[in-house]
Amino acid sequence: MGIFNNLSAVTIFLLSSAITTLGNKFLVKNLNFHRHQLLIILQNIIIVSILVCYNFLVKNIINFKRFKKWCIITVFFSVMIVSNMKALSCFDVSIYTLYKNISIVFVAITEYAFFDRKLSPIGYLSFILIVGSSWTGKPLKKSELVGYLWMIINIFSTTAFVLLLKHIIDNESSRLECVFFTNCLSIPFLLILSYFIDDYNKPLNLTPFVYFLILFTSLTALITAFSTAWVLKLLTSTMFSIAGAINKVIVTAAGIVIFKEDLEFIKLISCCVATLSALLYYYDAVKYKRQS
């Protein structure tokens, strides 16, 4: 039963996260939705509205008095999703997902330093492979410097968010409360960012399909948020990040097909290395659990 729960949680997380990433990329790149913060705000409002309706119509399980303790993690959450959207707009999907693998190493190192999680030689090898999978073989371009800056910010904010969320979920809060507060409290912060960062001089082409895709990605983002909390409840933060590495392989492959990106040899090698690193770490984690 435990293995089934783990597989179900990881599978739902992988699918919903991949669909959300690809949907957002399609909105930003193909449909020219250039107001990135506004897009996130709309998605968050839809998610919060659904959760409020569920809370009052089905069962009252959100403790609104706890909002203060969610303020710090909400800052990291807001920075994470904003930098994620900015980095996604600067890179091809395949390149973006490969760089994101570096956050796994930061999560593992932090767990090792603060939570006494030991790493075997196989574990170290898997992390070396993860870093190696992020190499694209391309020289750094000046036009991509902004994208790399957003990616660095995203890596650190993702690490902080995942570890803090894992700590809170392990101690008390429900998954519904977790998703509600992170999305609700981030809206004011995103409104401020939208005012200063988003370009309101260019008009948006708001067709019915754009509205539909915003609603659809909001629903998949909601599923991703719940499955994230579910996976973190069942697994370690590092194992969750390894699941993210598998997700990035799926997104990379889908990005090459859907957005017709260049099918370069180095991308294929990077995807294979990322998959191998994830499998190695999973094998090492299972072996360690059996021995303990």
Image (tube, rainbow, N blue to C red):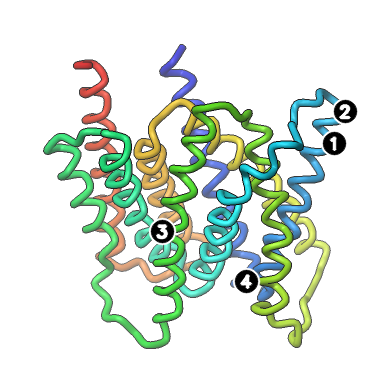
Counting from the top left corner in percent of width and height, residue 239 is at 36, 36
3D distance between C-alphas at marks 2 and 1: 6 Å
Q: Quadrant of the C terminus?
A: top left
Q: Are marks 2 and 1 in contact (CB under 8 Å)?
A: yes
Residue drawn at 67 percent across, 68 percent down: 37
Counting from the top left corner in percent of width and height, residue 210 is at 76, 64
- Residue highlighted by disc 4: 30
**Between tags 2 and 4, which lies in front?**
2
Circle nearer the N terminus (3, 4): 4
Circle nearer the N terminus (1, 3): 1
Q: Residues within 10 Å of mark 4 (few under 14, many from 20)?
A: few
Circle nearer the N terminus (2, 4): 4
Residue drawn at 27 percent across, 24 percent down: 286
- Residue highlighted by disc 1: 53
Circle nearer the N terminus (1, 4): 4
Which amino acid does the dot numbered 2 rest on?
A: Leu
Q: Residues within 10 Å of mark 3 (few under 14, many from 20)?
A: some
Instruction: Check disc 1 and report its element: helix, strand or loop.
Output: helix
- Residue highlighted by disc 3: 156
Q: Residues within 10 Å of mark 2 (few under 14, many from 20)?
A: few
Circle nearer the N terminus (2, 3): 2
Which of the 4 quarters of the picture holds residue 56?
A: top right
Q: Are marks 1 and 3 in contact (CB under 8 Å)?
A: no
Residue drawn at 77 percent across, 38 percent down: 51
Counting from the top left corner in percent of width and height, residue 154 is at 46, 62
3D distance between C-alphas at marks 3 and 4: 28 Å
Which amino acid does the dot numbered 4 rest on?
A: Asn
Which amino acid does the dot numbered 1 rest on?
A: Cys
- Residue highlighted by disc 2: 57
